[in-house]
Amino acid sequence: MQESELLVRRIKEGTVIDHIDEGRGLQVLAALQIDGRDGSLITIALNVPSAKYKKKDIIKVENKFLADDDTNKLAVIAPRASINIIKNYKLIEKRRVSLPNEIDRIFRCANPDCITNSFEHIESVMDVLDKEGRVLKCRYCGRVLDVNQLKYN
Ligand SMILES: [Zn+2]
């Protein structure tokens, strides 16, 4: 077992999000709307030494199995993340994140005049124009958005 895996305790059931780009762990929590309010045990490790890429963040959420729909949103924030589903201490599924064709709700459009930024409470919808380059476009106002400058809803 790698040294980094020992930093956070093993979980019996749940989801481990590994290989999050360093410094992005808290954004990942925000994007997935994981705040621990439901009482689930959440372990966050930031800046963990990693063999592949100097450092990484890791999140473990116990008793929760994250669906593809949710985890694919992470491709915007942490394109190298891997999702590990654990049952009875065993890794039963490992998947990479891949950008979906559209991303709903989590990001705010950069255009201040966009209807999604008004008081209408319209949730943002963004089409993914370029999966490799991670280019998004607001479906409402057509603004092309840089994923590195997106703000969270
Ligand atoms: Zn817009």
Image: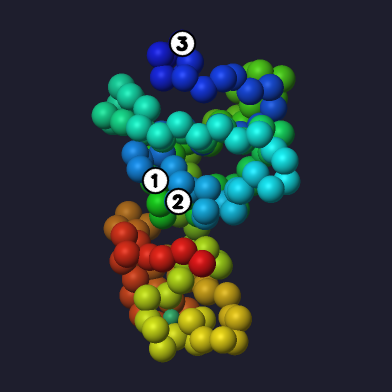
Residue 13: image location, x then y, percent: 69, 27
Mark 3 Cβ inside 8 Å of ligand 1: no
Mark 2 Cβ inside 8 Å of ligand 1: no
Q: Residue at x 40, y 14 (%)?
A: 3
Q: Is residue 4 left or right of residue 32?
A: left
Q: Is residue 126 left or right of residue 67?
A: left
Q: Residue at x 45, y 31 (%)?
A: 45
Q: Amino acid at mark 3?
A: Met
Q: Pick out the residue farthest to the top.
A: 1
Q: Pick out the residue farthest to the left.
A: 54
Answer with mark 2 or mark 3, whichever residue precedes in sequence.
Answer: 3
Q: Amino acid at mark 2?
A: Gln
Residue 129 in view in this figure: no
Ligand 1, by image quadrant, is bottom left
* Foreground label between 3 and 1: 1
The label shown at residue 1 is 3
Q: Amino acid at mark 1?
A: Arg
Report helix, strand or loop for mark 2.
Answer: helix
Residue topped by disc 2: 27
Do tag 3 and tag 1 residues touch (Cβ < 8 Å)? no
